[in-house]
Image (tube, helix red, strand yellow):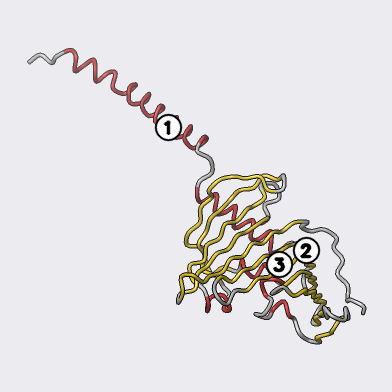
């Protein structure tokens, strides 16, 4: 029986055709990888690097604006600086009352808003207490058990610096906040150059009341600068 010539010809050409097809497919995958930007895994690694860099920084300045929504509302706005491992200073308002605190080593100093004198609280690290943990220790808001949901949603300019913008839903490592709030949602700006956290907006809900919740905005700058925090003198 004669074999049709077209089958023989196609068999001879089949190898080169498959090779060309493979090259085209691989080329398409490569181009898609190049132009689609970093993968989600790369994005998460960048965020983890930003967390690590922020925590190991020797010093930084910050401001914090905190709101507790609802009928028992709470509002505070402070600005300060922190020098690792045990120096911090803040100044601002809490519940419309002027406040100023300085912590040096194991002692905390509180300025009397009426007399202007400094009161000494010996052997009390107020930055580790639940009362002013957000204001005196803003990094406590970034202690996470894990981050089940994280996504880089884009890039923005913040104070003239280019930043990656992330949205995440972490499980936090903060007993005080865990007992009162659920559904934590973070929007975080990460500096593209030095890979530090520059800003975060944190929101959470109170389980028993949908109208109550937590709203915090934190900004960081001047990482690893020579900042001076001394024991205040009355």
Q: Is residue 161 above or below residue 16?
A: below
Judging depth in this view, the residue of 135 and 221 nearest the camera is: 135
Residue 29: % across, % down: 44, 34
Dividing the picture into quadrants, the one containing residue 234 is: bottom right
Would you say 32 lies left or right of 223 here?
Answer: left
- Pointer 2: what residue? 58
Q: Is residue 202 above or below residue 68?
A: above
Instruction: Give the residue number, with chain letter if any, for mark 1.
Output: 26
| Spatial separation of the CA atoms under disc 1 and disc 3 | 55 Å
* Of labels 1 and 2, the one closer to you: 2
Q: Which residue is mark 3?
A: 77
Foreground mark, 2 or 3? 3
Labels 1 and 3: the sequence-earlier one: 1
**x, y percentage for residue 86?**
78, 74
> Looking at the figure, which quarter contains the N terminus?
top left
Residues under labels 1 and 2: Cα distance? 46 Å
């Amino acid at each position: 029986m004669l074999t049709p010539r077209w089958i023989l010809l196609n068999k001879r050409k089949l190898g080169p055709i498959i090779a060309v097809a493979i090259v085209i497919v691989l080329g398409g995958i490569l181009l898609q990888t190049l132009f689609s930007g970093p993968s989600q895994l790369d994005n998460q690694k960048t965020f983890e690097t930003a967390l690590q860099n922020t925590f190991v920084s020797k010093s930084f300045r910050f401001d914090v604006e905190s709101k507790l929504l609802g009928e028992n509302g709470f509002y505070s706005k402070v600005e300060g600086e922190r020098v690792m491992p045990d120096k911090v200073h803040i100044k601002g308002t809490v519940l419309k009352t002027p406040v100023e605190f300085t912590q040096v080593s194991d002692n905390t100093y509180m300025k009397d808003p009426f007399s202007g004198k400094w009161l000494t609280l010996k052997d009390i690290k107020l930055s580790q207490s639940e009362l002013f943990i957000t204001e005196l220790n803003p990094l406590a808001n970034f202690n996470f058990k894990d981050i089940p949901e994280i996504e880089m949603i884009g890039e923005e300019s913040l104070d003239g610096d280019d930043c990656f913008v992330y949205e995440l839903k972490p499980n936090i490592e903060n007993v005080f906040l865990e007992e009162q709030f659920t559904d934590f949602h973070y929007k975080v700006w990460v500096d593209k150059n030095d890979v530090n956290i520059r800003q975060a907006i944190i929101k959470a809900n109170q389980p028993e009341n949908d109208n109550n919740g937590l709203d915090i905005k934190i900004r960081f700058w001047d990482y690893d600068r020579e900042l001076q925090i001394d024991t205040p003198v009355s």
